[in-house]
Amino acid sequence: MRRPSFGLKVFDVPIIVLAAAAAAAAGFAVYGGRAASVHLEIEAPGGRWVYGLDTDRTVSVKGPLGETLVEIHDGEAHIIESPCPNQTCVAAPGISRKGEWSACLPNEIMIRVAGDPDADGGLDAIVY
């Protein structure tokens, strides 16, 4: 009975090393970077606001039903109060990672975490 051969060829090791390096670089590009590279965007009928997630604050946003309060605390944003009837937005978890979003649909308020618009990370607030 002949045993199978699992020997490596001459170019197998460099190919394996290059594949591992490419996977590590791709992982860092997607998940790496500074925590300050994200910011919170708030959209409402009255405008659009951008806040850094690194400063704790409470923002009042006016919608058709009244005021919605958005809290930024410990790098996470959360709708803490809204005049909507079902309060689904208040029950939703906080958001902190790029691409996450939350909304109060009856009051037409949307919050989402997006990439940093300025390279120095010194964002305080931007109003459009």
Image: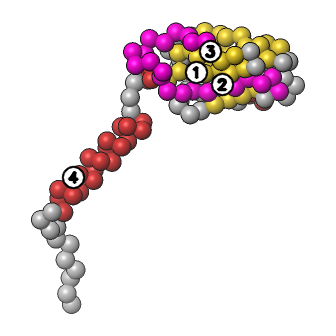
Q: Amino acid at mark 3?
A: Tyr
CA gap, disc 3 and disc 1: 13 Å
Q: Amino acid at mark 4?
A: Val
User: Which residue is situated farthest in the bottom direction here?
Assistant: 1
Q: Is residue 102 left or right of residue 27?
A: right
Query: Do residues under tags 2 and 1 come within 8 Å of each other at their CB atoms?
Result: yes
Q: Residue at x 53, y 15 (%)?
A: 52
Quadrant for the N terminus, please: bottom left
Residue under numbered circle 2: 111
Q: Earlier in the sequence, mark 3 or mark 4?
A: 4
Residue 110 appears in the picture as rendered = yes
CA gap, disc 4 and disc 2: 42 Å
CA gap, disc 1 and disc 4: 39 Å
Q: x, y (%) of residue 37?
A: 45, 23
State which mark lies toward you, 4 or 2. Answer: 2
> Dot 2 lies on which element?
strand
Magenta residues?
A: 106-128
> Dot 3 lies on which element?
loop
Residue under numbered circle 1: 40
Q: Is residue 95 left or right of residue 123?
A: right
Q: Is residue 29 left or right of residue 10?
A: right
Residue 80 appears in the picture as rendered = no
State which mark lies toward you, 3 or 1. Answer: 3
Residue under numbered circle 3: 128
Q: x, y (%) of residue 79?
A: 70, 21
Q: Earlier in the sequence, mark 1 or mark 4?
A: 4
